[in-house]
Image: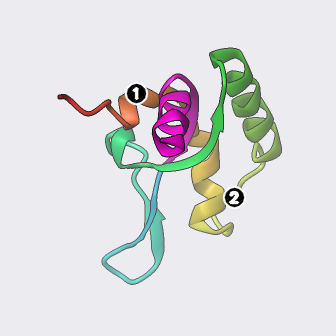
Amino acid sequence: MRLRVAKLILLAGWLVMVPKVVSGPDGRETFNADAPVTSWRQYSAHDDAATCENRIVAIKNLFRDVGAKDSAEVRSMPYAKCVPAEYIYPSAKP
């Protein structure tokens, strides 16, 4: 029963999503910022949109000086987006 309650709380929140890092054709790590956000990686969860957006601002400030020599994980962070949790985890239809 508690699992269902936790899921309902999550579905009411907001998620910070970042592009998923994958191995490219040459074996080097890369990411696709143009991929659908539903295929991205969840970075964090928040109770409301304002808190989520504040986290995005903090992330973008922290990673503003990202360069080509940084890891793909670091280079993907400036692309972070806030999305409603139900967009990523739609509720099950009865």
Q: Which residue is at the front of the view, 4 or 44?
A: 4
- Near mark 2 (Cα within 10 A), the count class, few <14, some 14-19 or many ≥20, is few
Task: Give me the residue at 53% from left, 48% from top.
Answer: 42
Which label sits on residue 67?
Answer: 2
Residue most toward the left? 94
Which residue type does callout 2 highlight?
A: Gly
Q: Residue at x 49, y 27 (%)?
A: 83
Residue type for callout 1: Glu
Residue 51 is situated, as x and y percent measured from the top left of the image, at: 73, 22
Q: Residue 2, percent across and down?
A: 54, 42
For residue 8: magenta?
yes
Q: Earlier in the sequence, mark 2 or mark 1?
A: 2
Q: Is residue 68 left or right of residue 17?
A: right
Residue contact between numbered discs 2 and 1, judged by CB atoms under 8 Å? no
Residue at the front extreme of this rendering: 1
Query: Who's the residue at 32% across and 30% down the image?
Result: 91
Circle 1 residue? 86
Q: Residue at x 19, y 29 (%)?
A: 93
User: Given this view, does label 2 or label 1 mark the residue nearer the observer?
Assistant: 1
Numbered circle sitting on residue 11: none
Say which element carries label 1: helix
Q: What whole-number distance in Å separates the C-alpha atoms at marks 2 and 1?
A: 33 Å
Pick the residue in front: 64 or 81.
81
Q: Secondary structure at mark 2?
A: loop
* Name of the residue lying farthest toward the bottom: 27
Q: Nearer the viewer, residue 77 or 1?
A: 1
Chain part drawn in magenta: 1-18
In front: 83, or 81?
83
Q: Position of residue 27 (x, y in %)?
A: 40, 83
Answer above or below: position of 71 versus 62. below
Mark 1 neighbour density, 10 Å: few (under 14) some (14–19) many (20 or more): some
